[in-house]
Image (cartoon, rainbow, N blue to C red):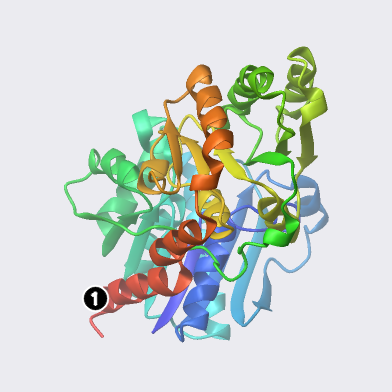
């Protein structure tokens, strides 16, 4: 089986964390014995300066990423909010597809990650009759929070795909409002061998860890306000909050931590490389997720693979992940409930078994288990 992954967003030197789960998905398939490749077109204003410097140079780069054939095109253009820019994006993906086929061979099936990629895959199917699976990840589907022009891409993905999947039950229910077709739920996979516990790195300090973008939809301000309520009642404990991530709210959040008189106990680390994130998880005692909407939450699985319990808002995806044995769900935006959950976590942390938490992550989200689910679906579509 030759599988071509077309992601709507993907890792880059500037953002090695962006779409890392698409790369992990492709690598897991490759390691499971499936011929797998990636074609990604970064079309828009992202990294505009670098794209300007590349004008006049070859339009694509082909490389082997740990055995994974990857063709990447970085093209300067206006955002995919207009009919003409959407069509141009699809043409560029088709161009990348043709070049990939010349270098690697024709795939048996395409896996389009996100409706932007699904739209491009629908055009490839029209021209070359290659079947495709469409997987949705976007929380903007809830309450139609996407640009009007994106409706065209979403409809094409839903109509042309040979199979439709989402990464959580909540997202499936949001997407089901837009189609009568069957939607399967297959979660993102996590490299369990990379994320693993290291008890030697634990200290007497109880560390809450936040890993994510510092943007409004992630609501990191709620976490700071909850920590400010939680902290006075736990002064006998050596407790810290570690914040890992980047975003335009960072300066505002740092000021807020000063205003709340908790800056002594809150550390902002910025964007860290993957290895450093693993270390932070191994040092921590609990991961906290405060999102307003989350379609899945890969970082939760990564933390659980490191043996960490999770406190998360009941914002969609976490409902499929967090159980009584692995953590606590709290209402969205409820600062007091979050502060209470943090207190409970400190007081009852001994009852959260790192071995069982990791075992739960391996069983439900490990690459071997999830990869086989994908391989079964690909075979069903292609009918091999």
Task: Name the residue at 52% across, 38% down.
Answer: 348
Work out which residue is located at the far left of the displayed protein and give it: 180
Q: Which residue is mark 1?
A: 380
Residue nearer the viewer, 194 or 125: 194
Residue 329 placed where, x, y %? 42, 35
**105 left or right of 314?**
right
Residue 247 placed where, x, y %? 70, 35
Q: Is residue 323 visible?
A: yes
Q: Is residue 335 above or below residue 220?
A: above
Residue nearer the viewer, 319 or 356: 356
Q: Quadrant of the C terminus?
A: bottom left
**263 left or right of 94?**
right
Task: Name the residue at 51% across, 43% down.
Answer: 310
Q: Quadrant of the N terminus?
A: bottom left
Name which quarter of the figure residue 197 lies in: bottom right
Task: Name the residue at 62% across, 83% down.
Answer: 67
Q: Is residue 85 above or below residue 109?
A: above
Task: Name the residue at 44% across, 47% down.
Answer: 296
Residue nearer the viewer, 85 or 305: 305
Name which quarter of the figure residue 42 lies in: bottom right
């Amino acid at each position: 089986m030759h599988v071509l992954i077309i992601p709507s967003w993907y890792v880059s030197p500037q953002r090695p964390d962006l779409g890392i789960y698409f790369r992990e998905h492709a690598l897991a398939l490759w390691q499971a014995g499936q011929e797998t490749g990636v074609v990604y077109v970064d079309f828009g204003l992202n990294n505009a300066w670098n794209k300007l410097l590349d004008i006049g140079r070859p339009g694509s780069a082909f490389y082997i990423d740990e055995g994974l054939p990857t063709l990447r095109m970085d093209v300067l253009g206006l955002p995919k909010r207009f009919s003409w820019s959407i069509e141009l994006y699809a043409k560029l993906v088709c161009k990348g597809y043709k070049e990939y086929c010349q270098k690697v061979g024709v795939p048996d099936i395409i896996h389009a990650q996100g409706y932007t990629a699904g739209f491009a895959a629908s055009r490839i199917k029209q021209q070359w009759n290659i079947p495709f699976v469409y997987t949705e990840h976007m929380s903007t589907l809830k309450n139609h929070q996407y640009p009007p022009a994106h409706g065209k891409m979403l409809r094409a993905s839903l109509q042309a795909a040979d199979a439709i999947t989402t990464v959580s039950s909540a997202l499936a229910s949001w997407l089901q409002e837009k189609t009568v077709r069957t939607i399967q739920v297959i979660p993102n996979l996590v490299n369990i061998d990379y994320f693993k516990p290291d008890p030697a790195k634990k200290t007497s300090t109880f560390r809450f860890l936040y890993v994510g973008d510092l943007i409004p939809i992630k609501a990191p301000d709620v976490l700071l306000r909850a920590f400010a309520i939680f902290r006075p009642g736990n002064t006998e404990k050596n407790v810290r909050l570690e914040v890992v991530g980047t975003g335009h709210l960072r300066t505002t959040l740092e000021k807020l931590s000063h205003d709340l008189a908790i800056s002594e106990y809150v550390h902002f680390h910025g964007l860290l490389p993957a290895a450093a994130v693993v270390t932070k998880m191994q040092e921590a005692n609990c991961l906290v997720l405060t999102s307003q909407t989350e379609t899945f939450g890969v970082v939760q699985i990564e933390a659980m693979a490191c043996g960490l319990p999770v406190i998360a808002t009941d914002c969609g995806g976490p409902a499929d992940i967090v159980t009584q044995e692995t953590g606590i769900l709290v209402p969205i935006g409820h600062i007091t409930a979050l502060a209470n959950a943090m207190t409970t976590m400190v007081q009852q942390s001994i009852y959260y078994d790192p071995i069982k938490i990791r075992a739960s992550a391996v069983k439900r989200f490990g690459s071997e288990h999830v990869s086989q689910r994908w391989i079964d679906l690909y075979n069903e579509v292609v009918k091999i």
